[in-house]
Image: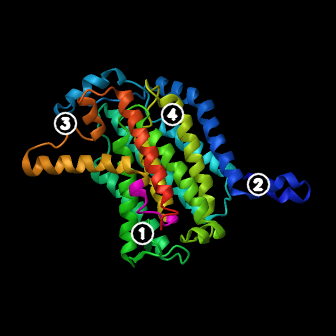
Amino acid sequence: MFYHLLYPLKDLFFGFNVFKYITFRAAGAAITSFLICIILGPVIIRKLKEFKVGQVIRQEEEARGIYEFHKNKAGTPTMGGLLIVTAIILSTVLWADLTNKYVLLAILSTVWLCVLGFVDDYIKLSLKRSKGLTARSKLIGQIVLGLLIGLYIYFDPQIGENLDIPFLKNAFIDLGIFYILFTMLVIVGSSNAMNLTDGLDGLAIGCTVMVALTYTALSYITGNFKISDYLNITYIPGTGELAVFCAAIMGAGLGFLWFNSNPAEVFMGDTGSLALGGAIGIVAIFIKKELLLLLVGGIFVAEALSVILQVASFKLFKKRIFLMAPFHHHFEKMGWPENKVVVRFWIVAAILALLSLSSLKIR
């Protein structure tokens, strides 16, 4: 909105020329989304408490050990993802170029997954149980979105169906029509991986901030002809504007962490985790950094893999690899305090972010 309203006034006053620059607007989006969370946070938390929107803690046999660690969190307001997504959308609308197709698709996709997560959370709360939508229903909602985005990209000549290989110079794989299936896999995988990681105070949102910061830089570089040419990476016109969207995610993440740090005053719930994971995955697809997401979001990947391996091992061999999955609970059962698990995971996430950015030069 500011771009459309204020940048045209540059002829009246040269200072308005700053709204032309993506870096300036990205910084503005990050600060705005942070402030929205800080200002609206107490209000939304109070309303969630009034409506008794409280977290349900698992008490099943396989989760009994963790229940002892987390039983004091029962009743903590959840659905905090509404705060995160509201901050992201509002700040993006204020600071981004709203004629940019990639920004519009990112916004619509985030809202889609937020609604899906909201329904899941609502079922949990209304029925007072730890499980909401069936896995099939949730998966269908994610697959449909992935299919629509995949079809759009397949017919978009600016993006194409080539798969960029990180750390290698001019290395691509032409997936052809199978790129649609690959897009679905990325969106479903990233959305669910974030959901699985959201199990400790501040864990998922803290890692998200680092991933969003990384993709802010990657989006800007991919959409800048001179820098992308210098670094020998694929230039995709218009994707630089996604830096504003990613910066909004980063700012909203920091704002939410203000209230979600241990002891958490609010949880994001599936309302936030499905939306955030999917949003990051969609940005990765638009800027052709899908495979790099495995490294940038290494924490999310490891969490998802721990669940897959645990289930497969138990079904095939009746043995568990981890004390409990997702594997942040494994470390809790080993005796690590919750804060130590979270901070150490943040440290690993920061290192992975730095390694990912190094891929721009190591080619």
Mark 3 sits on what residue? 323
Which of the two marks, 1 or 2, is nearer to us in this view? 1
Front residue of this view, candidates 45 and 315 = 315
Ranked by sequence position, the earlier of labels 3 and 1 is 1
Magenta residues, start to end: 286-295
Q: Nearer the viewer, mark 1 or mark 4?
A: 1
Label 3 to label 1: alpha-carbon separation: 35 Å
C-alpha distance separating marks 3 and 4: 28 Å
Q: Residue at x 30, y 22 (%)?
A: 71
| Residue that numbered label 4 is attached to | 257
118 horizontally vs 250: left or right = left
Dot 1 falls on a residue whose secondary structure is loop
Q: What secondary structure is marked by label 3?
A: loop
Q: How far apart in space, not on screen, are marks 3 and 2 (Cα)?
A: 52 Å
Amino acid at dot 3: Leu
The span from disc 1 to disc 4 (Cα, nearest Å) is 33 Å
**Amino acid under label 4?**
Leu
- Image position of 309 with respect to 100: above or below: above
Contact between marks 2 and 4 (CB within 8 A): the answer is no
On screen, residue 152 above or below 359: below
Estimate how packed mark 3 is, as few (under 14), some (14 to 19) or many (20 or more) residues with alpha carbons within 10 Å: some
Q: Which residue is mark 1?
A: 165
Q: Depth check: give the residue in front, 79 or 187.
A: 187
Q: Residue at x 74, y 55 (%)?
A: 3
Residue 221 is inside the magenta segment:
no
- Give the mark nearest the N terminus, 3 or 2: 2
Q: CA distance from mark 1 to mark 2?
A: 34 Å
Mark 2 lies on residue:
19
Q: Amino acid at mark 1?
A: Ile
